[in-house]
Amino acid sequence: MIYVNNNNEFHLSTANTSYIMKVLKSNHLSHLYYGRRIKDRNDYSNLYRSYATPVGNETDYSKKCNNYSLNVTNLEIATYGKSDYGEPSLQIEMEDNSRVSDFLYQSHIIYEGNKQLIGLPHTFQNEDKVESLEITLYDQIVDVYVVLIYKVFYDRDIITRSMKIINGESSKIKIEKAMSLNIDFENNNYDLITLEGKWIREKHIQKQRLKKGVYYINSKRFTSSADHNPFMCLADIDVTEDYGSCYGFALIYSGNHQGLVEVNPHNRTRIQMGINPFDFSWILDEKKEFQTPEVIMTYSYRGLGDMSRNFHNAINYNLIPKQWQFRKRPLLYNSWEAVYFDFNEKKLLKLAKMAKELGMELFVLDDGWFKGRNDDTTSLGDWIEDNKKLPNGLAGLSSKINELGLQFGIWVEPEMISKESDLYRRHPNWVIKLDNRESSLGRNQLMLDMANPNVISYLYNQLSSVFKRGKVRYVKWDMNRSVTDIYSSYLPKHRQKELAHRYILGLYDLIGRLKNDFEDILFESCASGGNRYDLGMLYYMPQTWASDNTDPGERMNIQYGSSLLYPLSTLGAHVGSNPSHQVLRQNNIESRFNVACFGLLGYELNLNNLSNFEKKAIKKQVEFYKKHRKLLQFGTFYRIKSPFNSNHAVWMVVSKDKDEALLGYYQKLQESNENLETVKLKGLDKNASYHLESREQYMNIERFGELINDYVPFNVKTNGLRGIVHKTISDNYMFKNDVQKIDTFGDSLMYAGFKLLQQFNGAGFNENVRYIGDFGSRIYYIKRFQ
């Protein structure tokens, strides 16, 4: 896995990839190759480019190294001031205000397994082959060490990178930039793929051709943000899901981050990821260390699909808490869209009874349960029940919920505080704010200073009490605003630029302690939806609420984009209200389910307002999900058609043994006289026999309008009692959609595809015609048979 030859060349190999570095004559560490697996060899000099003459007017590094400039050398760490004019990955200011550094190879160690990154989330070994390499570099002039840490996960085709800075004995230093990853490639013939977005529109795929210059993704919000997820992919310009080379990079961090791609005048492409250097510095005292977050890297020569599956496996096996790995997640009901702040115990229990009747397993009480919380202007920070709403407290409510046969879960937003709260009146200095400025508000609230250990202790005690007395089995951990007025009353003046990172370290400390103390609680991360859907939070909380948007048309894009990095086992998805509370679009109950079921299913709508048709449909949905829960939460995911460049999305999950699969088919807009369609499946056993059958789903007869007269033995007028007749029929008769059944072979399904039934084209309708409509969908179950 890690091989070092006699030429000081390092070969890090996984099952299918190779990562090769070299210590140059100057003692700089140079990147030689990252790509498809090659053999261990005693000499990789053919991978290194040397120059016979000066490269234009580039500056030579030293007299001893003729025709050698760092500006045309591929490096593993980049600093400014010694002939590299690209973006530095490490910037240090010394006490004399000098800023030049030059880190040269000193030593290395190799060991089995991996070490923890203290205070930071990180990948870990889990019954798989892992080796680690630490390369120590040293700048003798400034007496500072840098340790580059590489972890090789052989079976996952994953390599991780991080960096540790160790100050010597000479003097304090100020770290101004410390990227976890720097890697240089020799050409720029790539597309850059990123995940951009905003609230209720997270993780949309963005692709652009690399050109000379610098491109950034970042966050300055104290969260990883919906703006730019901490993920980047460099891909061949003709890459597809199944063909072509691509490199994926993902940062295990939840705060201000930066991803950088630079193409210099010589077409050297530099990739960096790490803590955002904007408004950041860190004073490092003598003999102290600073550890950067970890970056996960993977390479695929079989397209974007394999890249994603490499990430999915690493996250499922080597990142999320072990007690939740491949452990089935409960089917939940969340109260938010049903009642918002307007509820009492009686109303909640009525919803809970209906949730139980429909087959759900967990009742989640969302915002509004603590004292005085009747809107979003008050009470954050005071985690005490509102006795008017809950006269028996959380203990009484949860006991009654449990008696119904449901687990009890709760919403909290611990990092926030309302001005109108007892906590603010007692500790106004616990808030991130400037005393000489009026504080800007987000959702009418302020942010607690998580860099202050007193805040962490308070929150730990308050939340522990809530979880215990409420017999809580699930926690939705929310975070609904971005930072402003950045100042900490706790930190000294000269350390104010440490606040953003210390905030995240404080958060990790808090949720780490709670995770360890309450191992049976399922924590779900949320930040106005997907504003903090990142690998850092997943280390502590195994799932994330992907978006506040439950509209299936919008979720189609969000969940497709999320799948580039995140597995279904991490993705919270709910069947929401109709019309959608986010876009006011009407969507039928079956399509809402068909999107939400690919992930961690929940329902979030007023169950007491459901029609009989909707109740019957939901019962069948719940039964279907429970039957296929393992496959939908932990199956191997394949993307087949992208909603970002077509009118459809198609994806599927396949069991590890390839015995069964589920295919999701989604349409945006109904087109007139729709084309006939064939879908090619993926991931099956080409030699196996399979039975394919569409999920039994139903159409509300009301959608037919006056066309219903073709299907009933009496005439329904287009006015008058039409609505009543339609509703009466729909409540008492479940009208089946089309049913398609096929027996065939895996190779036929994958290479030739299966032909979907024709869509409704205005010329007739029967059981062999699909009526999909706008934002309609189908699910198909595929099962191996002998």
Image (tube, rainbow, N blue to C red):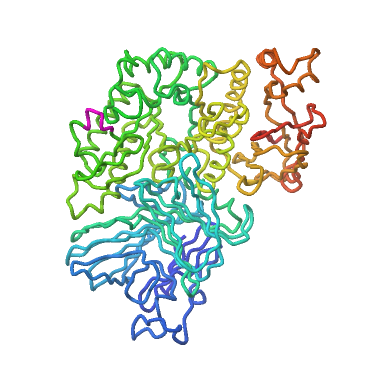
Residue 702 pos. (x, y %): 68, 21
Q: Quadrant of residue 460?
A: top left
* Magenta span of residues: 418-424
Q: Residue at x 60, y 20 (%)?
A: 614
Q: Residue at x 26, y 29 (%)?
A: 420
Closer to the camera in the image, 494 or 15: 494
Q: Residue at x 23, y 52 (%)?
A: 496
Residue 672 pos. (x, y %): 75, 38
Residue 51 inside the magenta-drawn segment:
no
Which image quarter holds the C terminus?
top right
Taking the image as shown, residue 373 lies to the left or right of residue 657, namely left
Q: Is residue 387 visible?
A: yes
Taking the image as shown, residue 659 lies to the left or right of residue 571, namely right
Q: Quadrant of residue 67?
A: bottom left
Closer to the camera in the image, 311 or 20: 311
Residue 330 pos. (x, y %): 48, 27
Taking the image as shown, residue 8 lies to the left or right of residue 485, namely right
Q: Is residue 661 visible?
A: no
Q: Is residue 289 above or below residue 571?
A: below
Closer to the camera in the image, 217 or 198: 198
The mark tally for this picture is 0
